[in-house]
Amino acid sequence: MRLKDDLLKCPMFSGVTDEDLTYLEDVVKNKNYSRGELLFSEGDEAVGFYVLAEGRIKVYKLSPDGKERILHIVHPGSSFAEAAIFGDGHYPAYAEPLQPSRLLFFPKQEFLELLHSRSEIAINMIGGLSRFLRQFASQVEQLTFQDVPSRLARYLLDLAGDELEVVQLPIPKGQLASNLGTVSETLSRTFRKLSDEGLISVKGKEIAILDRDGLEDLSESTKER
């Protein structure tokens, strides 16, 4: 039951039947990883994809001089590296846990064979990839039309979800700055600005959300306003 619940939290598998879930259980492998344990490197042969059940995963690239550029922070219920098994067969980036994590791993060959025999799962996977593309388009829109305070407000709200009032930043602030398309100094000033306005309070990596409605308004604002 736990495995089925984990899969149903992933948009890629939304709407699958109980029978489909039984087939998926025969393919998927439950794996645990430690913080910093490399899942795969850029250029590695894509041997499968993952669904994150517990923990946090960062997906990133390295510049020629070794500087890290975070592409995406994966949260529980999300899948990643699925496109690699259909593309050129290689992972396009690096991935490693930011904390101890439990993942569901789908081996490439077994999963592709399952798609051939269970077309409903293939349809759901296409839907999941479409949602990811919409999320990516939203990120591009944020970088284009929103300033750093708006982007930070949206990041904190996404991190908190509907219930949490206090969150822990899962990555160093320098990496967060890169992820939001800015620099560390600007991010630090933005944290102070949001704190001075009474929207949040900051204690190291711990962020308390004091005014959720205010953050929502800020997250929806654009540079033109």
Image (cartoon, rainbow, N blue to C red):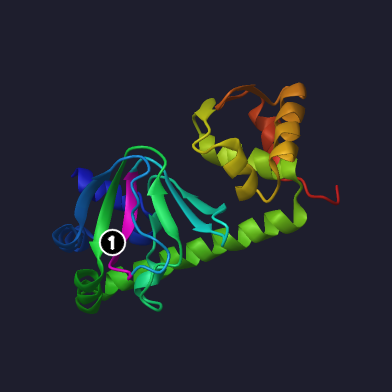
Residue occupying image coordinates x 70% and y 31%: 191
- Farthest residue toward the right? 224
Magenta span includes 60: no
Amino acid type, residue under disc 1 in the picture: Val
Compared to residue 115, the image places residue 156 above or below, namely: above
Name the chief secondary structure element in magenta: strand
Residue occupying image coordinates x 43% and y 45%: 75
Local secondary structure at mark 1: loop
> Viewed as shown, does residue 53 lie left or right of 73?
left
- Farthest residue toward the front? 65
Q: Mark 1 points at which residue?
A: 16
Q: Can residue 182 be seen in this view?
A: yes
Image location of residue 156, percent across then percent down = 59, 37
> Viewed as shown, does residue 63 lie left or right of 100?
right
User: Can you tell which quarter of the image residue 14 is in?
Assistant: bottom left
User: Can you tell which quarter of the image residue 187 is in?
Assistant: top right
Compared to residue 163, the image places residue 116 above or below, namely: below
Image location of residue 31, percent across then percent down = 23, 48
Q: Can residue 210 be seen in this view?
A: no
> Viewed as shown, does residue 192 lie left or right of 7?
right
| Range shown magenta | 45-53
Residue occupying image coordinates x 55% and y 58%: 135
User: Can you tell which quarter of the image residue 115 is in?
Assistant: bottom left
Image location of residue 175, percent across then percent down = 58, 43
Image location of residue 15, percent across then percent down = 33, 60
Q: Which of 157 and 16 is in front in this view?
A: 157
